[in-house]
Image (cartoon, grey):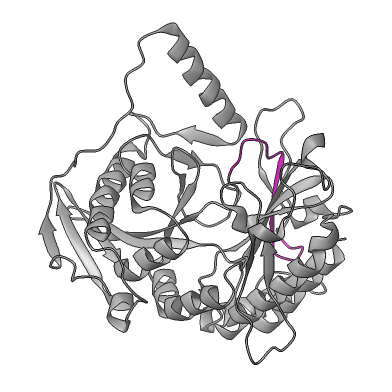
Amino acid sequence: MAAPSPGPREILDPFPEAPRRAPTSNSGCRGLLWRLRDKQSRLGLFEISPGHELHGMMCMMQAGLWAATQVSMDHLPTGLPSEEDFSEVLTQVHEGFELGTLAGPAFAWLRHSLGLAEEDYQAALGPGGPYLQFLSTSKSKAIFFLSHDQRFFLKTQRRREVQALLTHLPRYVQHLQRHPHSLLARLLGVHSLRVAGGKKRYFIIMHSVFYPAGRISERYDIKGCEVSRWVEPAPESSPLVLVLKDLNFQGRTINLGPQRSWFLRQMELDTAFLRELNVLDYSLLMAFHCLHEDERGPGSSLIFCMARSVQGTQSSEEPGTQNRRLLLDVPNALHILDGPEQRYFLGLVDLVTVYGLRKRLEHLWKTLRYPGRTFSTVSPARYARRLCQWVEAHTE
C-alpha cells in the first residue's frame, strides 16, 4: 500500500505550524462572531474557548491530529489496505502528551475512497479553529465534539468499544465497498490520547450525519423502543434545540416519496450486516428541514439526475437487487434524501456495542424490570428487525 509510516515513537513539535484564525479587531468582525456564537447556542453547541474545562484536551487533540494526518499525507494510499494496515499503531510523542493513531493507513484509504482530501481533513481538525462541544442527550459518559466547521464529529469511547470497532473494521470496509451508499456512519479515524502520567483515552472521528446543519430544524435519535426514549423538549421560547428520541416522534411520519423503497432496502442491508457482527444498541440519526419552493419537484436545481447517480455493486447472492443512490449536489450527500417537501439527514451510528455476557445479563435484568415494554438491550437479530419495522411504520 503506502510506504511504511515512521517508527512507533516519533518526536514532534508540540504545536506544528497550522493556519489559525486571524484576530478580530473591528466591530464588524465582532458582530459576525457574535451572530455565529448565537447560532451555535441555538443548536446546543458551545465553543471550547480558553477557560473551558475541555480546552486543554482539545488543544492536545488538535495538535496531535495535525501531526497524525501529516503522516498519512506523506504516505498516501496506493491500493487496498493490507492486513498490516488494519493492525498498525503509530504513537507520536508531543510535549506533555502522546497521541496514538490506530489502523492509520486503513482509515487513510477509507478517507481517500470517500473523496475526502487529507488537507481538508487536517485543516478542519487541526488548530485552525476551536472545536464545539456538543450537548448530547445520551446517557453515556462520552464527550462529544464537532470540528469548528461542524463537518466532523468526535466522540470518546471505552477501550473495549475501540477493540470491537477495530476487530470489525476490515468487514466494515468491505461492506462500504459493496454498498457505497450505505447508511452506516463513515468512520474516519480512531485515536488514543495519553497525558503525561495518565491513562489512555480513546476517541473516534466520523462524518457528522447532520451536515450541512444550517437549516436543520429538528433532530432525532431512534432505536425502535420505548424505555428511556423520551426527551423533555426545550420550551418554545428557548433557543436550544435538542436531539429528541423515539417517543417524541410518535404520530409523525417520514415522507420520502419514491425514495422510500430504496431507504427500506438499505436499512435491511445495513442492519443485517450489524446483526452478523453481533452488534446492537445502534441508533438511526434523523434530522430534516423544509425544502424551499425552488428546491421541490422536477424543475428544481437539485433534481435527481441519472447523470449524478452512483450505483453500488450488485452481488451474485442477491440477483435483481440494486443499491442505487441518486445524489444531491450538496456536501455529505451520502446521508441526505429529499422527499417531496422536506430534506432528510439519515445515518446509523454507535456501531460498537457487542452482545456479550454483560449485555445478556442486562437483557435479563430489563426483562424483569420492564415487563411488557420494549427496551434497547435485546439480541442483535431482534434489534435489527425491530428498527427496520419502526422505519417501515414511520415512512411513506
Q: Nearer the viewer, residue 266 or 203?
A: 266
For the stretch drawn in magenta, the main secondary structure is loop
Q: Picture quarter containing residue 370?
A: bottom right
Q: Nearer the viewer, residue 146 or 268?
A: 268
Q: Nearer the viewer, residue 331 or 55?
A: 331
201 vs 158, left or right, is left
User: Magenta stretch: residue 223 in it?
Assistant: yes
Percent from the top left, x then y, of residue 145? 45, 46
Q: Picture quarter containing residue 58?
A: top left
Q: Nearer the viewer, residue 318 or 124?
A: 318
Percent from the top left, x then y, of residue 24? 36, 15
Q: Is residue 362 visible?
A: yes
Q: Picture quarter containing residue 214?
A: top right
* Magenta region: 212-227
Q: Residue at x 36, y 40 (%)?
A: 54
50 vs 97, left or right, is right
- Quadrant containing the N terminus in the rendered view: bottom left
Percent from the top left, x then y, of residue 108? 35, 64
287 vs 161, left or right, is right
User: Magenta stretch: residue 309 in it?
Assistant: no
- Give the answer, above or below, for where 108 lies relative to 86: above
Q: Residue at x 81, y 69 (%)?
A: 261
- Give the answer, above or below, for where 161 lies relative to 98: below
Q: Residue at x 66, y 59 (%)?
A: 307
Residue ranking furthest to the front: 307
346 vs 27, left or right, is right
Percent from the top left, x then y, of residue 279? 57, 77
Q: Residue at x 45, y 58 (%)?
A: 115
- Quadrant containing the C terminus in the rendered view: bottom right
